[in-house]
Image (cartoon, rainbow, N blue to C red):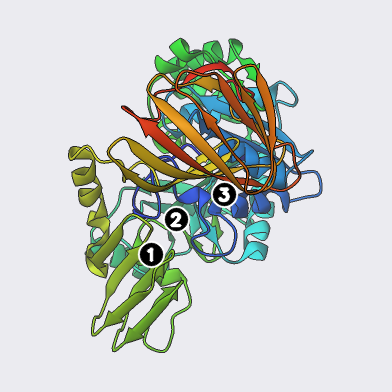
Amino acid sequence: MLAVILSGGSGTRLWPLSREAYPKQFLPVVSGESLLAETIDRGLALSADARVMAITNEEHRFVVAAHLHAQASGRTAGIILEPVGRNTAPAIALAALAASEVNPEELLLIMPSDHVLRNPEAFRAAVAKGAKAAAVGKLVTFGIVPDSPHTGYGYIQAGKAEEGYSDVAAFVEKPDEATARSYLKQGGYYWNSGMFLFRADRYLAELEQHQPDMLAACRRAYSEKQADLDFVRVGRKDFEACPDDSIDYAVMEKTRDAVVVPLDAGWSDVGSWSALWEIQPHDSDGNVCRGDVITEDVTGSYLHSEGRLIAALGISNHVIVETDDVVLVADRARVQDVKKLVAQVKAQGRSEHRFHKKVHRPWGTYEGVASGARFQVKRITVNPGASLSLQKHHHRAEHWVVVKGTAKVHRGEEQLLLTEDQSTYIPLGVTHRLTNPGVIPLELIEVQTGSYLGEDDIVRFEDTYNRV
């Protein structure tokens, strides 16, 4: 079985914790692991020979690769990069085409990277039931056993029951509350989880029948694939021409072979701060408190601190989230409207919708410490063995002070080796490179001075990571 993890999303429903450049699937919002790490673990736990493939985008590729290297070494079937977002149906088509090169009857378990499943045993049991149906050509979707009349999910109506699964009678759009209550009372309705299981050849055959233009575009794009480090790049022009559609609309609602397997495994798509409050343990006042939080006369609230102390008094049913550059305060009933705040941030030309103060790069991270007219201070961490690009800047000079570890510095024609408490100066226009030759992270403080300090003032000559 091949676990195909869809990790192209950049949603901001958990803003300000989730940002476009580092969204929720990379964050440990529930446990000590990120949601992507938990998803990889689920895929690998299906069997001793289960493998993992990821579908992601250009911006997130190095973070996804780091996760797979750390967790799935030797059990990775590749990372496919979408040149542009074209929804789930084309993304899954690329995975099916890749799998078919090895085994056309490979079972593909499609999983979003940002869901929570608190009962892994129940999940594995449901997948085992679904695998029997998928092996004989059925297209399996997993229906979440509902515990409330939720209006934020689409529903699946089960039809004729078989052993371990049922035919799909209908896919139903998100209902109003009265309709959702009627579904629960009637029974036989499930939330649409967005997880699927089928043979690679069966999915491609259904696309051929129902979406031939989509399949043709994906075939052309995949035929132009090129390897780039850990990644497979497909043809951009052909993939851009591919119709944009979800697997639900493109295939599952049209096929005659759709079946649903009930799943009762503590599932959540963590679609809002309220959803995160619902799935986590509450204290005696109904609060979820994470990080440095103190409360007095606070009930039914979610309070999350990334660093500074949150002190809350006399509030009910609120969400307070503190990061190093944003504090969100919201009525818990209004958290679906966080997107309106994000829209204001974008409209004002700010960057808080896109980046955290700590920005992740394939070689490590950098974090803004202070800035003003003609200066900027950053804390830089370089992973062991990693190297920044060979580069120069037209508008700024840089001063580096090593705080921890060892730095190998290429500066013009010079090669320097700096250890803790040593420093160097990179004049404007001088070619330079920073490398960590050690076995522990390199930490340094960088002071930039100059007329322009934007990240786009970089001319790269060589780059380990093939960045432009």
On the image, numbered disc 3 is attached to which residue?
36
Q: Which residue is mark 2?
A: 269
Front of the two marks 3 and 1 = 3
Residue nearest the viewer, comparing 261 with 12: 12
129 or 367: which is nearer to us?
Answer: 367
The residue drawn where x is 47% and y is 32% is: 398
Q: Quadrant where the N terminus lies?
A: top right
Residue 417 visible from this viewpoint? yes
Question: Would you say the residues marked 3 and 1 are in contact, meaning their CB atoms lie under 8 Å apart?
Answer: no
Q: Which element carries disc 1, helix, strand or loop?
A: helix
- In the rendering, which numbered label is found on residue 275? 1
Q: Is residue 184 above or below residue 400?
A: below
For the residues bearing labels 2 and 1, Cβ distance under 8 angstroms: yes
Q: What is the secondary structure assignment of the residue under circle 3?
A: helix
Mark 2 residue type: Asp
Q: Position of residue 213 (x, y in %)?
A: 43, 15
**155 and 293: which is toward the camera:** 293
Q: Residue at x 46, y 71 (%)?
A: 291
